[in-house]
Image (cartoon, helix red, strand yellow):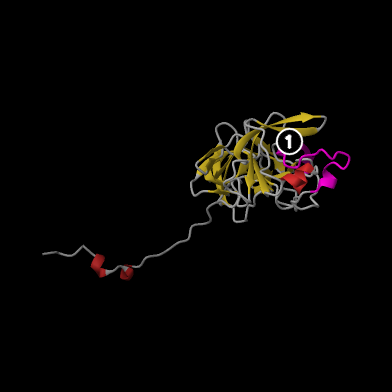
Amino acid sequence: MKKIFAFAIAAVALTVGCQKIQSLVNPDNDQVNENDPVEIKFNTNLAIVETKIVDDLNGLTLKVFGINDTDPNSARQFKDIDAIASTNEGKYSLDLTDGPYYYDGNTDKYSFYGYFLDGATLSDGNVTIDGHNDILLAAATENGSYCGSEARNGKDPELVFTHALSQLKFAAINLGTDAITLTSITVKSSQVGTMTVGSDQQNVAGGSDEYDFSVDISEGVTLASKATVVSPGDEDYTPAGSELILFPGASYELFFTLTQGEEGSFIERTLKVKVADEIKAGEAYKFNVKFYSLEKIEITASLIGWGEDVVVTVEPEDVDPADDNSGDGE
């Protein structure tokens, strides 16, 4: 199952545009100076829907962007800044390590983005994964851009983080008559891809390289015979190892290594499967794999006794003269 994380920067829907609203800012205080800079604050809470790997943001270092859409050259914007998440009574706050930052005036419109690598490495737009990195991307674009006037009114943007990669899980069943052991699962897929962040074009895509990602099956998975199961349901499959988190839309080749038999008659084989289905970002896929144990080839024989002799009489005239070497010769 998966959870989508939502950072609510005040978590309020935007209903007013980017204009000065004195009466809504502080109707009881006529000393409010609307020309004072308004700080961009990241007071957040966590909306849990479903999860893959990351289920607690406390202490994590996230990356955030605050882009001035009105004036791309504005000094009052930030790009790829570290923001450390901390929790207090179930709510999260983000502390910018290089801040504070302020809106540029009251009407300049801003867009906000964020991402979390979870151990993946990013360099010059190329991202490298190890099969266990739950990369998250975020954009506060559901309600459009944001500005200083809306911040004065207590209406701040909401960053919604979603999973950028795909999760693969495995389960197996043995429909043969002898027990077998699943000793390894390897997925050949892309390890290095491209990653675009800090714009409305944010995305992650796998490359063309091939890398062998190994599922953690430390002691193997023993699969007893379920040959009597006619139509196996999901509950009949045995979970096999840990999950992998890989690039969506890449090519995937699955390799399953099986062993069978006892010492002295030990058999090992590897089966290959190419995934034809589309694997999408933010989705979890469970592969239920059917295996059949090798059946022994047994040959039985029976002995039929000799019958009575069949007499064959050969007459002299039946002999081919060309085979008669009894002549005088030369």
State whether residue 165 appears in this view: no
Q: Residue most toward the bottom?
A: 317
Characterize the magenta stretch by its predominant secondary structure. Answer: loop
Q: In which quadrant will I find the C terminus? A: bottom left
Q: Position of residue 131 (x, y in %)?
A: 59, 39
User: 51 above or below 219?
Assistant: below
Most foreground residue, 132 or 137: 137
Q: Position of residue 216 (x, y in %)?
A: 62, 34
- Is 161 contained in the magenta span? no
What residue is at 66 percent from the left and 43 percent from the top? 104
Span shown in magenta: 21-50
Q: Position of residue 144 (x, y in %)?
A: 71, 53
Q: Position of residue 105 (x, y in %)?
A: 68, 44
SS of the residue under disc 1: loop
What residue is at 49 percent from the left and 57 percent from the top? 309
- Residue 33: name its quadrant: top right
- Is 46 contained in the magenta span? yes
Q: Which residue is mark 1?
A: 55
- Residue 269: name its quadrant: top right
